[in-house]
C-alpha cells in the first residue's frame, strides 16, 4: 500500500477537503498532517474548532488512516518523517507566497522518487466567503466571552484595538491585511473610557456612567463577533462593581480592567500633572475578590491595572501590587506607563517574568509607541492594547473637513479626502 500525505487546517470542512481526501485515498493509505491551532492562529485566525476537535472529524473521514500534527506551514519536516509516496494538494499554490512551500515539497519528495499530485482547486469554495458568512451569522454572549481566554491559550497573545461605536467596532472586526503569507487582523476590541467619553464630548473622569457605557458596548456587540475588553475605570464602589461584573458577563464581554485609583479619576496619561490618588493594596484586593465572587463562569476575566508607575510610586510598589493582586485572584495584570522611552515598561516586564505566580500581562503602548509588538511579546506581554488610535486619527480628519468648508464656503475641496458617496452608501451591507 502506498503512503499518501495531505496537509490541511480543516477548520471549516467543505467539499474541497473531501475532494482532496478522495483523490488521496485512491492512491493509497492517507496520512493527514493537520495544522495545529498555533499555525492556524499565526497564519490566519483563531480556529473555530481546536486541534483535538478537528482531529476527531478528520480521523473519521473514509480513507484516512492517521492524523498527525503539522506544526509549521512547511510540510518538509513531516515528509522527512513519513516518507510518503505521494503528496496531494490543491493547485492553488503554484503562485504567490505558497510557491516556495510547494518547491520544497517537490524537492524533498524527489529524494525518494515521491510525487506531488495536484488537483484542480474546488470551484465555488472560498474559505474567506465561509468565514464572512459565519461572522454575518453573529455570535452568542457565551461563545464571544470565551474567545479571549481561548486566544491567550492557543495563540499566546491578543492584539486589541479601541472601538467606541458600531462603526469603529466594524473596523476592528473586519480590517485585515496580508503580509508575508500571514493574514493579520485585530483579535478584539478595547472599549476605552477615554475614547468612549471623548466620543460623547465628555471628559474622562468616570462621568459617563455605566448605563451610557452599556449603550456603547451594545452598539459594538450588535455588529461584531470578536471579544471585548472593557476599560472599567476604577470599577467604582465595591458594592456597585459586583453588579457591573454580572452585567458584563451576561452580555458576553470577555474582560474588565479596573485600575487601582480612588477619588476623582483622571486619565493616566496626565500622570502627576493632576491630583490622583492610588487605592490601598488591601482595598483594591477586596474589590478584585468581590468581583471574582460575583462571576458566574470562569470565562469572564477581571484584570487588575497597576498605576504605580503613572503616579511615580516606584517599580517596587508596582511589583508588590502585581503579587498582591494575583494572590487576590486577578485573571490578568495591566501595567501602565507614560514614559516615552519604554524602559520603565520593559523593566517591569522583566521583573514580572521572575514572579512565581503569573497571569496574562496587559500593556498599552501609547506613550512608548515605538516599541513593537514583537518586543513586547518577547518581554512577556500577552495582551497589547492600542487604546485610542481610531478616535485620534478620526478627529484631525474631521477637523480638516470642517475647516475647509468654512474656508471655501463650499464642499468641493473636501472631496479629495472624503470617501465617495457611493462608497458610504454601501459601506454597511443591507442598506440598498
Ligand atoms: C483608556 O483608554 O481610557 C485608558 C488607557 O484607560 S489610558 O488613556 O492610556 O489611560
Ligand atoms: Mg481609561
Image (cartoon, rainbow, N blue to C red):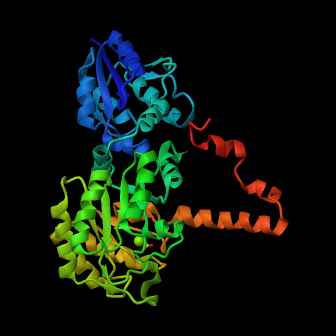
In the picture, measured across the screen, residue 146 lies left or right of residue 139, that is left
Q: Quadrant of residue 21?
A: top left
Q: Residue at x 51, y 22 (%)?
A: 91
- Residue 159: where, in percent of width, then height? 42, 56
Q: Residue at x 51, y 29 (%)?
A: 93
User: Would residue 160 be visible to someone looking at this image?
Assistant: no
Relative to 94, residue 207 above or below = below
**Of 76 and 423, which appears nearest the observer?**
423
Relative to 49, residue 407 above or below = below
Q: The N terminus is located in which quarter?
A: top left
Q: The C terminus is located in which quarter?
A: top right
Where is ligand 2, by quadrant? bottom left
**Of 289 and 37, which appears nearest the observer?**
289
Q: Please count the marks in the image.
A: 0
In the picture, measured across the screen, residue 101 lies left or right of residue 295, that is right
- Residue 304: where, in percent of width, then height? 27, 70
**Of 57 and 82, which appears nearest the observer?**
57
User: Would residue 165 be visible to someone looking at this image?
Assistant: yes
Amino acid at each position: 500500500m502506498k503512503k499518501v500525505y495531505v496537509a490541511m487546517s480543516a477548520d471549516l470542512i467543505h467539499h474541497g477537503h473531501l475532494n482532496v481526501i478522495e483523490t488521496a485515498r485512491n492512491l493509497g493509505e492517507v496520512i493527514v498532517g493537520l495544522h495545529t491551532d498555533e499555525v492556524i492562529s499565526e497564519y490566519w485566525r483563531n480556529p473555530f474548532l481546536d486541534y483535538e476537535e478537528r482531529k476527531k472529524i478528520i480521523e473519521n473521514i473514509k480513507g484516512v488512516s492517521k492524523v498527525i500534527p503539522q506544526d509549521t506551514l512547511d510540510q518538509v519536516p513531516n515528509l522527512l518523517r513519513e516518507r510518503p509516496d505521494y503528496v496531494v494538494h490543491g493547485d492553488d499554490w503554484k503562485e504567490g507566497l505558497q510557491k516556495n512551500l510547494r518547491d520544497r515539497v517537490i524537492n524533498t519528495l524527489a529524494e525518494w522518487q515521491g510525487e506531488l499530485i495536484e488537483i484542480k482547486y474546488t470551484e465555488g469554495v472560498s474559505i474567506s466567503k465561509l468565514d464572512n458568512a459565519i461572522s454575518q451569522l453573529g455570535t452568542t454572549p457565551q461563545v464571544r466571552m470565551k474567545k479571549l481566554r481561548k486566544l491567550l491559550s492557543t495563540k499566546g497573545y491578543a492584539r486589541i484595538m479601541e472601538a467606541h461605536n458600531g462603526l469603529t467596532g466594524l473596523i476592528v472586526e473586519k480590517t485585515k491585511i496580508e503580509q508575508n503569507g500571514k493574514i493579520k487582523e485585530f483579535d478584539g476590541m478595547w472599549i476605552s473610557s477615554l475614547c468612549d467619553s471623548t466620543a460623547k464630548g465628555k471628559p474622562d473622569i468616570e462621568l459617563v456612567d455605566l448605563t451610557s457605557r452599556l449603550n456603547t458596548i451594545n452598539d459594538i456587540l450588535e455588529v461584531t463577533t470578536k471579544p471585548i475588553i472593557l476599560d472599567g475605570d476604577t470599577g467604582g464602589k465595591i458594592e456597585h462593581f459586583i453588579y457591573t461584573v454580572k452585567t458584563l458577563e451576561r452580555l458576553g464581554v470577555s474582560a474588565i480592567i479596573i485600575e487601582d485609583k480612588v477619588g476623582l479619576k483622571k486619565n493616566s496619561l496626565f500622570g502627576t500633572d493632576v491630583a490622583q490618588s492610588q487605592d490601598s493594596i488591601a482595598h483594591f484586593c477586596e474589590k478584585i475578590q468581590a468581583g471574582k465572587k460575583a462571576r458566574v463562569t470562569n470565562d469572564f476575566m477581571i484584570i487588575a491595572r497597576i498605576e504605580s508607575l503613572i503616579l511615580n510610586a516606584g517599580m517596587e510598589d508596582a511589583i508588590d501590587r502585581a503579587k498582591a493582586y494575583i494572590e487576590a485572584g486577578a485573571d490578568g495584570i495591566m501595567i501602565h506607563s507614560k514614559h516615552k522611552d519604554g524602559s520603565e515598561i520593559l523593566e517591569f516586564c522583566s521583573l514580572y517574568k521572575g514572579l512565581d505566580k503569573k497571569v496574562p500581562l496587559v500593556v498599552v503602548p501609547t506613550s512608548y509607541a515605538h516599541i513593537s509588538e514583537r518586543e513586547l511579546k518577547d518581554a512577556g506581554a500577552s495582551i497589547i492594547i492600542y487604546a485610542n488610535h481610531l478616535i485620534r486619527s478620526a478627529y484631525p480628519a474631521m477637523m480638516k473637513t470642517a475647516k475647509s468648508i468654512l474656508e471655501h464656503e463650499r464642499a468641493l475641496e473636501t472631496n479629495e479626502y472624503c470617501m465617495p458617496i457611493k462608497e458610504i452608501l454601501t459601506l454597511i451591507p443591507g442598506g440598498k
